[in-house]
Image (tube, helix red, strand yellow):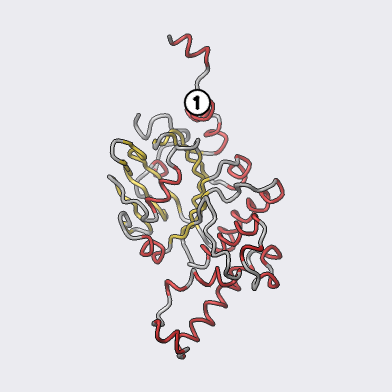
Amino acid sequence: MSTDENVAGPAGPQDGGAGPGSVLDLTNLSLSFGGLRALSELNLQVGDGEIVSLIGPNGAGKTTVFNVITGVYEPSGGDVVFAGKSIAGLAPHSVARMGVGRTFQSLRLFLNMSVIENVMAATYGNTKATPLESILRLPRARREEREARALAADVLSFFGQRLAGYRWDQPAYSLSYANRRRLEIARALATRPRLLLLDEPAAGMNPTETHEITELISRLCTERDVTVLVIEHDMHVVATCSDRVVALDHGVKIAEGGFDAVASHPAVVEAYLGRDPEALSDAG
């Protein structure tokens, strides 16, 4: 199947290729593991200030897209362009320094470190002090430590009472599951990303927490000037915060456009629910 078949919505830059004001462009992106085709000629664009949701059943290739963007996997073909520069095949730390932050499906916090230390840890990739300067507590190391703590405090303040000051010195393992999710987003924000990749941020949350995380995703764009690409299975979150929705199945883009158009697209319905048995009988 071509990557542009069965695509909902008008054709144009959003169907792949560079476009004006785009932050991320995936062009004919492919990835294979031996004989297994994980991504097949995927074209995807994320515009500056957009919230774009990636949906699809388990095994559709959504997290694989994130792993290719962030340098965990090197693509077999195609290109990944971020802010006008190709980042395909770069190491993860290089991609992060260029302004791409991410969270993960499974939480990857430092559970025995405090809340604020977890956030500060994300800033050290951009510091200049040497290990010796840090050990001897020389002026540059002390200054960067103060700057890292100030940045962490600013990021944590974005989450209001959920990660309020009295929690800063508590170990991460003492937090509720929802607050651990918030802390992981805070740590990603501390890298000062232009593009933030959120992998199932509402997973495991109750309805109240899901509503709060949906509002938080919207605020990331308006208050933090961050472009967001989010993977999410909760359709309430997708419908509420997305500017555009892209559906994948077996590594192929099967639909793209507004939420209503994508959610009702026949290829998306089939990917989630399978084909109508009566239609299969008729076809036979």
- In this view, the residue farthest toward the front is 112
Task: Please give left or right for residue 61 compared with residue 145 in the image.
Answer: left
Looking at the image, is 64 positioned above or below residue 126? above
Q: Quadrant of residue 83?
A: bottom left
Give the percent coordinates (x, y) of residue 33. 31, 41
Looking at the image, is 190 positioned above or below residue 181? below
Give the percent coordinates (x, y) of residue 236. 63, 41
Give the percent coordinates (x, y) of residue 24. 40, 53
Residue at horizontal 57 percent and vertical 70 percent from the top: 113
Looking at the image, is 32 positioned above or below residue 221? above
Task: Please give left or right for residue 121 compared with residue 30 in the image.
Answer: right
Instruction: Tell me the quarter of the image containing the N terminus.
Output: top left
Q: Secondary structure at mark 1?
A: helix
Residue at horizontal 45 percent and vertical 73 percent from the top: 124
Looking at the image, is 106 positioned above or below residue 94? above
Q: Residues within 10 Å of mark 1 (few under 14, many from 20)?
A: few
Residue at horizontal 57 percent and vertical 34 percent from the top: 260
Residue sitting nearer the eye, 144 or 54 = 144
The residue wearing badge 1 is 270
Q: Amino acid at mark 1?
A: Glu
State the count of labels: 1
